[in-house]
Amino acid sequence: MDRNQATRLGLVTGAHVLLIGALLHTVQTQPPLPPKEITVTLETPAPLPVVAPPEPKPPQPKPRPQPVIKREPVPKPLPKIPVARPDQVATEPPPKPVPETPPPQPEVKPAPAPAPAPAPVSQPRVDANATGNMKPPYPPVSRKLGEEGRVLLEVYIEANGSVGDIRIKQSSGFPRLDNSALETVRKWKFTPARQGGQPIAMWYVQPVTFSLSQS
């Protein structure tokens, strides 16, 4: 800090000290003001006049309920229906007759054309004397014992004439005769049945007779 600044600071400080001292002197030299007297007056309010409570009113008597009188409804007069005089009555014309419609006739359908008759069937044929168709041999034991009889065989003949199946339909009564006929006819060849010119397969009954007089 330089000298000029120190001098200024000293002057400012001294001025403040003198000002504060002057103020303190002034405050101490002035006499105190006398206190003001404050008078407070309390007023008592005048008492209110006493009002007597109202006397209660005597209870009024309740009215007695009046009896309810039911009144019967007065019937309303019926409205008068005007009666038409004979000359005012309208006469309706008689209904027109409805023409009778004839009942519908049932539709007649034409009869179906008859199915064509099947072509006739020619029965198979066999020739026991033909080549390869041997006559069933007479069993020697049956011939010795005098066994005779007739065997009916059911033969299924194929379209080519061969035997497809064979069975005994009616026995001769002697198993030896039945077996001889069965085994022999199984090897036969037949002329097959035909229908419409075409060979067909079918069952056929072939009889075989064993007779000592014809053997």
Image: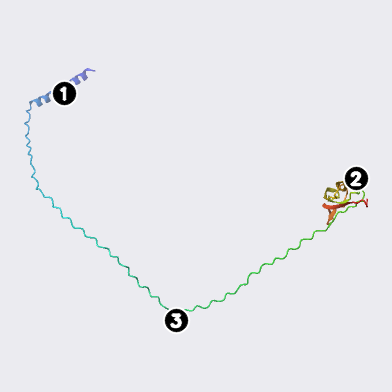
Q: Determine if residue 138 is in view.
A: no
The first of marks 3 and 1 along the sequence is 1
Could you say which is closer to the camera, residue 11 or residue 30? 30
- The residue identified by callout 3 is 86
Could you say which is closer to the camera, residue 80 or residue 61? 61
Residue 167 percent location from the top left of the image: 82, 48
Residue 197 percent location from the top left of the image: 85, 56
Q: Amino acid at mark 1?
A: His
Q: Residue at x 16, y 23 (%)?
A: 16
Residue 151 percent location from the top left of the image: 86, 51
**How far is the residue under mark 3 from the one under mark 1?**
147 Å
Could you say which is closer to the camera, residue 105 or residue 60? 60
Q: Nearer the viewer, mark 3 or mark 1?
A: 3
Q: Residue at x 9, y 25 (%)?
A: 28
The first of marks 2 and 3 along the sequence is 3
Color style of the picture? rainbow
Q: Amino acid at mark 3?
A: Pro
- The residue identified by callout 1 is 16
Q: Determine if residue 27 is in view.
A: yes
**How far is the residue under mark 1 from the one under mark 2?**
188 Å
Q: Amino acid at mark 2?
A: Val
- The residue identified by callout 2 is 141
- Label 2 crowding class (10 Å Cα cut-off): few <14, some 14-19, many 20+? few
* Residue 35 falls left or right of residue 142: left
Q: Are marks 1 and 2 in contact (CB under 8 Å)?
A: no
Residue 36 percent location from the top left of the image: 7, 34
* Residue 84 falls left or right of residue 96: left
The first of marks 1 and 2 along the sequence is 1
Q: Secondary structure at mark 3?
A: helix
The quadrant of the picture occupied by the N terminus is top left
Q: Is residue 16 above or below residue 94?
A: above
